[in-house]
Amino acid sequence: MDSPIATSAPTATSTPDQRAARDRRRGLIAGVLASLAMLVTVVVIRQLSDASSLLDALADALLLFLPMGMFSLALDLFGPQAKTMMLGGLMIALIAIGALIGRAYARQTAGARRVMWTRAITIGAAIFGVFALFMLWFVSSRAPDAIAGPRMLTVMFQLAVEAAVFVAVLAISLAALRQQDAPIGVVVDDNAAGRLSRRRLTTRVAAFAGAVAGTAVLGRAVANVANRPTVGVTTPGEISPAITPIEDFYTISKNFVDPDPDRGDDWSFMVDGVVNEELRLGRADLEAMAVTTFVSTLTCISNPIAGPLIGPAKWRGAPLAAVLRQAGVGPGAVKVIMTGEDDYTDSIPIERALQPEPMIVWEMNDVPLPKKHGTPVRVIVPGLYGIKNIKWLTRITVTNEDYQGFWQQRGWTDDATIKTSSRFDVPGNRGVLAAGQIEIGGIAFAGDRGISMVEVSQDGGESWVEVPIVENPSPAGLSWVIWAMDWVAKPGTYDFVVRATDGTGDLQTDESASELPDGASGWHRITVGVA
């Protein structure tokens, strides 16, 4: 049984309270080192395994319980970098908790100069128990496939390793920090003082090096999230192309680290639930159906007015309706749930799923789906925001109950119908132009309703002129259109506004709304000076 070593009478150089305060500070340091080591382990294991990680689960839980107002504020302040801020914040919070655990461990072990393994293992077991209960409760209730079957053993093993790393570093580092000083009441000669001085230097250098190394690894993980491109670099002063190149196509996901499924050409996905026959379908099965090449525009529900999180691509795939007909939709079906490799889920009504537009695709712009866009197979649902267009598809489930997906549980819309939008690509806002003929142009988009008309005002909306639609990459009306006009500019200041009318005759609303909970709305306005 562990117990503190016996000590002689206190010296006059320090009081018991001073020694206790110093020991608690060392406990804080040991707790920080242990937390850094544990988080490094989490990051490394996450890179080596496709199982759900602790950081991913904590982020999902934070998103679930974060008040909608705070979530909206974070989007407004940080945009796509809100995810980076969340990852950094979670790491800092875990390090702070670890420091407090280290402080408590120091108090419990009462200055012991040797490793107190019994208490350390008790702490480790408690940490593992908390992590395991959290993962079983939270993850299994919202993404059962994430820790089903063998994955459960993998997740539990990961948590055990992470807890073990924490307690090992905590116990060993605290004992090392305590051994910088001579035992209380022991007379130290010159040789012993020299050894203690060297030990003190070695311990501090080792602690500093460990802290720097751990911080560097975690900093790199945060930087990888921060530097992950959301949109490509567009050329200023040019109208967007009719089809967005893959390298410029926006990418958004809920993940800190996106999955990298290595399913090769022999990929497949499950079809189950309220169906007559459960199926596992691969590419050959889909290619035996009515394979279609079509152009459709994707846009993120968090795209602001005139934002860059939008783009059309040419897709190749098979109708979701054909897959459902082959499985046979059972009576009472209400929704179709789609699940990705990253355990992200969302659903669409069965009536929409049986329409000809939703597709299961495996090519994008004439090449196999890239990793960041959902390789090897994904779902495209024209007319609905990107939250409904599942990447890295692994399962399609027909259910006879309502279903709220990942973002619906966090307050976003379940309808997800894309609102009509339009924007200026050229000229830029607050630009100063030379008098003469100037090209004005941009895009307009209304989901699967198409665009029938685009209008531009140069006086803040007092008067309007219809402008030509010069390109429409989707005859079916599933994509944005490109509009452009030549304008003879005279010196002055102009307040330009653009609006669009969809294919049903409904005019784009001028009512401004933020992205949360069902997509931004409002007219795009720019101010242009002509000299």
Image: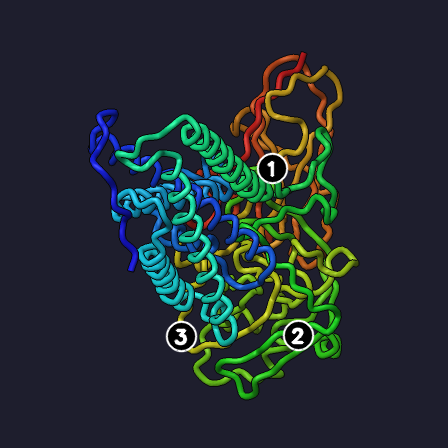
Quote the CA–CA distance across marks 3 and 1. Answer: 39 Å
Q: Position of residue 218 (x, y in %)?
A: 53, 43
Q: Which residue is mark 3?
A: 401
Near-viewer residue (253 or 389) = 253
- The reply, left or right, for residue 389 in relation to residue 141 is right
Q: Residue at x 75, y 22 (%)?
A: 437
* Label 3, residues with CA under 10 Å away: few <14, some 14-19, many ≥20: few
Snapshot quadrant of residue 293: bottom right
Q: Amino acid at mark 2?
A: Ser
Dot 2 or dot 1, earlier in sequence: 2
* Label 2, residues with CA under 10 Å away: few <14, some 14-19, many ≥20: many
Question: Which numbered mark, 3 or 1, is in the foreground of this view?
Answer: 3
Question: Which numbered mark, 2 or 1, is in the foreground of this view?
Answer: 2
Q: Position of residue 14 (x, y in %)?
A: 24, 27
Near-viewer residue (259 or 18) = 18
Dot 2 or dot 3, earlier in sequence: 2
Residue 174 in view in this figure: yes
Q: Is residue 240 above or below residue 530?
A: below
Q: Which mark is residue 423?
A: 1
| Marks 3 & 1, CB-CB < 8 Å contact | no
Q: Is residue 62 above or below residue 466?
A: below
Snapshot quadrant of residue 307: top right
Q: How is the image coloured?
A: rainbow
- The reply, left or right, for residue 93 in relation to residue 447 is left
- The reply, left or right, for residue 424 in relation to residue 273 is right
Q: Is residue 21 above or below residue 113?
A: above
Q: Which residue is mark 2?
A: 268
Work out which quarter of the rendered image holds the C terminus and state it.
Answer: top right
Q: Amino acid at mark 1?
A: Arg
Circle 1: element type: strand
Residue 31 in view in this figure: no
